[in-house]
Image: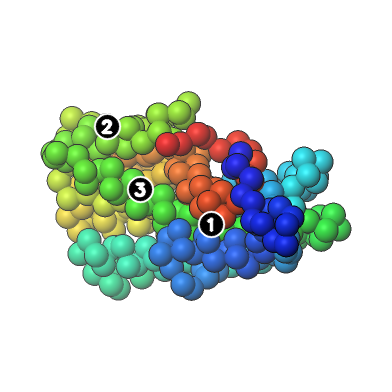
Amino acid sequence: MACTFLATITGYHTRMTVDTERIMKIGLDLAGWKKLPADSAVHVRGRGIRKVLMAIDVSAAEIALAKSLGCDAVIAHHPIGVAAINFYRVFDRHIEFMIEHSVPRDIAKMAVKKLQERVETRSHADIYSQTVESARLMKMPLVNIHQPCDEYMRQVILESIQSSKKVEYVTDIVKSVGRIPEFKNAKTKVKVVLGSEKNRAGHWALVVAAGTNGGYHIAKAYYTHKVSTLIYLHVDYGDLVKMREEKLDGNLVILGHLAGDSIGMNGLAARLEKEGVDTVRLGILPGR
């Protein structure tokens, strides 16, 4: 936990506090962004926040736990409530990434449209309101910060790979990411699931912080336009089977969902602690 930050006011020691809007601003600053993405939201507003529970996934159980621990707010990573319904809207960032790696715009848009339709359709099966309503009933301020934390994570991973003396083979990427503390501390290890560690990395692309990994259609768009190696946090097994059955010519490295998300949440926690907010990190892997 953070050390308590004290400010002297008329002879009394008062611990500094923040509100939910300030928490969201800190999350955006973490990524270097000004605009709030559709997958993040302040669900239940609050102020006078001195202690927060932070978790990657939050349900009514985590909100009750936060109450019992004396927390003043809960910060979730993954989208909940309206942010879960709007989640598919942040996938457009995949188009930016693909264009940066020479995938034609029309092909990039088509690949992303297929992913968006799949996720938006699935959202109609979600019971999306219960966690937010639980927070309201328990009078617990609730925020979720998804893409900004993922963008911070992307920057950390990219810096680690680029700081290597060379990225000649796929194994060089695996080793570079494996040096990041959260990945060192993970039970799952960085793994090559398509291609081989012994292959040349060639033109590689880090495909994270665009909502979700992109799956089969986005991978195919990259591989058919001279990208040799893709780096995902994770991949659906059905998508991986399609890639293997079609014998897509490329390497796919998966890093590990929990480790990647922990980087962003640890970064956010460190910023909050600098402002005097105590953090209780639930299920988040330790970092640097």
Badge 2: residue crowd in 10 Å (few <14, some 14–19, many ≥20)? some
Q: Is residue 230 visible?
A: no
Dot 1 or dot 2: first in sequence order is 1
Q: Which mark is residue 175?
A: 2
Front-lying residue, 236 or 83: 83
In the visual, does 104 lie left or right of 279? Answer: left
In the picture, measured across the screen, residue 74 lies left or right of residue 145, that is right
The relative height of residue 282 versus residue 275 in the rendered view (above or below) is above
- Residue 230, x across and y down, in percent: 29, 47
Question: Disc 2 residue type?
Answer: Lys
Residue 69 % position (x, y): 77, 40
Indicate the quadrant where residue 119 lies.
bottom right
Cα separation between marks 1 and 2:
26 Å
Q: Quadrant of the C terminus?
A: top left
Tag 3 or tag 1, which sits nearer the N-term?
A: 1
- The one of 112 and 74 positioned closer to us in this rendering: 74
Q: Residue at x 59, y 46 (%)?
A: 56
- Type of amino acid at the residue the image marks with label 3: Val
